[in-house]
Image (cartoon, coloured by chain):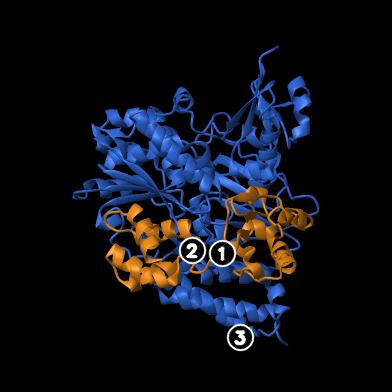
Chain colours: A orange, B blue
Amino acid sequence: MQKQVNEILAQARSEPPNILQALLVLQEKLGHVPLEAVPEIAHTLGTTTAQVAGVLSYYPDLRVTAPGRHLIRICMGESCFANGCGRLLREVQDRLRIDMGETAAGGKVTLDTMSCAGNCAVSPTVIIDRDLYGRVLPSQLDAMLERYK
Amino acid sequence: MSMATRLFLSNDTSARAAGAGPVADAWSDRPEVQLIRTSSRGAFFLEPMVERDSPDGRLAWFNVTPQDLPLILSGTGGTPVRSIPFLAQQTRFTFADFGETEPLALDEYQARGGLQGLETALRRTPDAIIEELRVSQLRGRGGAAFPVWNKWKVAQQAKADEKYVVANADEGDAGTYCDRMILEGDPFRLLEGMLICARAIGANRGYVYCRQEYPAAAATLRAAIHKADEAELLDLDGEFFPIEVVEGAGSYVCGEETALLESLEGKRGVVRARPPYPAQAGLFGRPTIVSNVLTFATIPNILSRGGAWHAALGTEQSRGTMALQLGGRVKQPGLVEVSFGLSLRQVLDQFGGGMAPGARFKAVQVGGPLGSLFPASQLDIPICYEAFAEAGAVLGHGGIVVYDHQTDMVDLARHFMAFTAHESCGKCTPCRIGSVRGREILERIQAGSGTVDDLVLLADLGETMKVASLCALGGRAPYPVLTAIEHFPAEFRNRLRT
C-alpha cells in the first residue's frame, strides 16, 4: 500500500502541494482513498494527517471505501425533483434493496444521489458510471439496470 | 456517387442524454452522411435535432431517431431554424453561434467574429479596457451581480508579484446549465474573456475551476486550451499566460468565490470572511479575479462591439442580456438568452410554451436552490436585478424551475433545507446549525408531529440565517422555504398536529 501510494503521489506532485488534487489522483487510481493511507499521504505531501483527513472528509466525491463495480447516481436537482426523481430514487432503492450511499451485497453497484447534473432541460437524470440518461421514466429502469449486470 | 450530405447534430451532454448518441452511432458508417457534431442551440425539447444546409439557411428535424435518416436525406419535412419561435424570439449575442459551429473549430470561431474582442483589448491600455467595462455596466452573472469593472479596477491597482484570473465553472445551482453549454460548446469564448481580463489586470496565470459533474466540459476545455496554445493565443505582451483546468469534488459551496479559492489551493472548501475580497487578496493571497463562466463569455462582445452597445440593452440597473435556463414542468425547457426586462410570465409563456402535458402550474423558482418561489399571482415581475431585489428575491445564475400541481410544498421545503444542511461548509454557526434545525423542523411537520410553534420557530430561524450567515448559502437558504410557507400556508398548517 505504502509503496503504491508513494508512486501515485510522485506523479501528482505540485508546488505548493495540493491535498485535494493528490487525493483525487489517488482515488482515480485506487477507486477510493484508504483511511489507513492518510498518514503516508500527509508525510509525502509534507503536511499533517489532520489536514489530509479534513480534506478527505469534506468532499462528497472522495470515498474512503471501495465503491461497487458500477456507480449509480440519481440527480436530486430542482428540475429533476419537479419531474419525479423522488419516485425514481425509491424505485431504484426497491429494486436493488439498498439505501442511498450503500453498496449492494457482492459489491455490484453503489447507489448515490447528486445535487445537480446540469441536465435540467432533459430531466430527470440518472448517471451510471460515465453514461448519462435523461428523461428517465420509472418504466425504463429495469432495462437500464440490466445493462450494468 | 453523389457527395455525402453534411448533417449537423449536437454533441452537448443534454442533447446526447436526449438521444443524440444513438443517432450518431447509427449513422457514423453511412457513406451518404457527413456528420458534424456541433454545440446545442439550447432548444432541448427538440433534441436530438438534426440540421442540414439549404438556400433558406439551416433546416431542422426535431426529436430525431436513427430511422429518420431517409426523410432527412430526401429533404422533406424540415423546418427552417430561423422560423422556430423559441429561437426566433430570443436576443442572442453570447449564444449566437450555438448549434452552428463545432466547439473546437478555432478557425470557425474566428470567422464568426471570435478573437476580435481580444485583439481590441491587446491594442488598448488596461485602463481603457476597464473603462469599456465600466461603460458597458456589466454585472457578474454568477449570482452576486457585482459590477465587473469595479473588481477589475481593484485587482489592477493592487501591487503584487503574481495575479490570477479564475473562471468559476462550478455551476452548482440546480436548474442551471448555461455554463456547461459554453464550456462544452464554445470554449474559446470563455478563454477569450479570461485573456481580456488577464490583460486588463496584469495577471500571470489562469485557472478554470470545473465541477466534477461536468466531465465533457473539462475535456473540451482542456482540448481548447491546447489548441489556443498551439495557435499562440495564450500570449500577452510576449508573456505566456497558462490556463489550467482544475476539477472539484462535488461540493456545492465551492461555487462561492472564497470557498472556491480554498478548494483550488487543495484545502477544505470553506468560506473565507470578506474583506479582504479576492480582487485584493485571493488565491494564495494574491489579487485574483473570480468570475463565472457566463460573465467571461459575455466580455469578448463588449470589447468588439463597445461598452455602449451592451449598455443599450436591458433595463436601468440590468444592462445586456441574461441567459435564462428553463427547467421543471414547462413544455419547452431550454436556454433563453434575452435582454433583461421581460416579465417572468412572458418568459414562461413565450419560451416555456406553457406547461408540460397533464401538468398544471403551481409555482416557479428563480435563481437556483436558494431562489424564491413565485405563485401564479406574482408572475408579472420583470426579470432584472432591481425588480428582484425589491421583491426580496434573486435572479442568481438564471435558473427557472417550474413546479406543477402534484408538488408537495412541505416536501419541497424539506428538500431545500436538507440540501443546505448537506452542503453547508460549517464555518459559520447560523448556516451549520440553522440548516440542520430547519431540516428537522420540516421533517417533523412532514411527519405530522409539528406544531404552530414550529412554524414560528422556522420563521425566526430563517431571519437569523438571513442576517448572520457568512455567505449566500446560509443567507439565502431560508428564502425558498419561507416563500413556500408564505404562498402555500394551508399545506403547512394542514400537516400540523392538532
Res A148 visible: yes
Q: Nearer the viewer, mark 2 or mark 3?
A: 2
* Residue A67: assigned label: 1
Please, is residue B480 above or below residue B28 in the view?
below
The local crowd at label 3, few if under 14, some if 14 to 19, many if 20 or more residues have their Cα within 10 Å, is few
Place residue B37 in its image quadrant: top right
Residue beneath label 2, please?
Answer: A32
Please, is residue B452 above or below residue B72 in the view?
below
Residue beneath label 3, please?
Answer: B453
Closer to the N terminus: mark 2 or mark 1? 2
Q: CA distance from mark 2 to mark 3?
A: 45 Å
Q: Who's the residue at 66% across and 34% down the image? A: B24
Q: CA distance from mark 3 to mark 1?
A: 43 Å
The local crowd at label 1, few if under 14, some if 14 to 19, many if 20 or more residues have their Cα within 10 Å, is some
- The picture places residue B426, in percent across and down from the top left corner, at 43, 73
Q: Who's the residue at 47% across and 65% down the image? A: B473
- Residue type at tag 2: His
